Structure formats: structure tokens, C-alpha cells
Image (cartoon, rainbow, N blue to C red):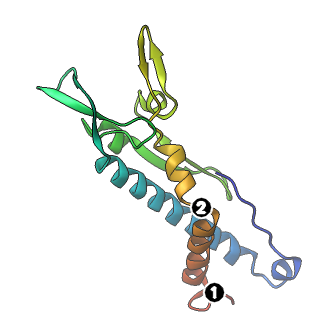
Amino acid sequence: MDFKVHIDRKDIHAGKSNYIRKAITVGMNELGKEMVKHAKINIKHSTKGYKKYNHYGIRGKVESSYPESYPANQTGELVSSIYYKNAGQKQMVFGSTAPYGGSLEYGHRWGNTIIEPRPFISTTDDSFALHRRKQIIRRSTSKVWGTGGNK
């Protein structure tokens, strides 16, 4: 995810650049927290019932989610591995540390077995459209500058 922020020269000369930088940082943190929360909720409530199979380490049969939907929550490892971190002032990394996260996101072929994609990172990023990102940045600007958003 990447977006640009333009800081006007008159704001820099007026000493507002530190406020703007702080507002962007606060906004990126809020956006990251909301994206992680959104992904976790959608994985926990994903529709199961596509296939039933034995899963190593879990008693009985488990159900997988449908392809192209959020992955099913079976062990909780994927949900607990979702994270975000700021990578510079205007960039954020949003992902999962689960070893099978990439296989779920993009699909995987293992011998004759094909695991169809169950995107959870790109789907969350797409659902947080640009207007939603701007709302969060605007809200964080109000927090930094006080109500009204400009100082």
C-alpha cells in the first residue's frame, strides 16, 4: 500500500511540517490497527464447508473455506500472525508471519494437490479503499491539531 501526501511550502515555512508528520504517523498507526482488526474478524467469521479433511494435530475433521474467500480459522495461528508496521513516513507493511500465509494468499500446488487462493491480505487492503484511508488520516489530523484539523 502506498499513497502520497503533499505538504505545501507555506505550511513548511509556517512551522506546520512537524504537525503534519505527526498526523501522518498517527493516521498510519490507526489504519494499520483497523486493517489488522478487519482481517482477523473476517478470518474468524469466514464461511466454512467447502471440504472436510483430517488436519494434523486437530482431532476429527476440519472444514476449509471456499476458494477466493477469507481462509477458515482452524488453529488460530494465522489470525495471531497478522501484523502491520510502519516502513517510513508514508508506507506501511501489512502481512502475516504464518509459514503457510503465502500459500493461502496466492494458492499452492503440492504434488497432485492444488490449494486454491484464499486471499486475506490483498482482500483486506482492497476493502480499505482510498476514501477510507483518507478518512483515517483526516481523523488523526484532528487528534494532533485538536478539533477542526488545522492549526
Q: Please state which amino acid type lies under the numbered disc 1.
A: Gly
Residue lying farthest to the top in this orientation: 111
Residue lying farthest to the left in this orientation: 59
Crowding at mark 2 (Cα within 10 Å: few <14, some 14-19, many 20+): few
- Between discs 1 and 2, the one toward the N terminus: 2
Numbered label tally: 2
Foreground of the two, 30 or 123: 123
Residue 149 is tagged as: 1
Q: Please state which amino acid type lies under the numbered disc 2.
A: Ala
Which residue is painted at 53% across and 57% down in the image? 127
Give the quadrant of residue 116: top left
Foreground of the two, 33 or 23: 33
Which residue is painted at 78% across and 82% down in the image? 15
Which residue is painted at 81% across and 81% down in the image? 11
Task: Assign a secondary structure to mark 1.
Answer: loop
Q: Is residue 2 left or right of residue 52?
A: right
Find residue 23 and report its horizontal and vertical position in percent.
62, 73
Q: Is residue 124 left or right of residue 37?
A: right
Residue 129 is tagged as: 2
Residue lying farthest to the front in this orientation: 50
Residue 132 is tagged as: none
Task: Assign a secondary structure to mark 2.
Answer: loop
Which residue is painted at 56% across and 76% down in the image? 140
In the rendered view, would you say 107 is above or below 110? Answer: below
In the rendered view, would you say 120 is above or below 139? Answer: above
Find residue 20 and report its horizontal and vertical position in percent.
69, 74
Foreground of the two, 97 or 40: 40
Label 1 – label 2 distance at C-alpha: 22 Å
Q: Are marks 1 and 2 in contact (CB under 8 Å)?
A: no
Crowding at mark 1 (Cα within 10 Å: few <14, some 14-19, many 20+): some
Find residue 41 and report its horizontal and vertical position in percent.
34, 54
Q: Is residue 97 left or right of residue 90?
A: left
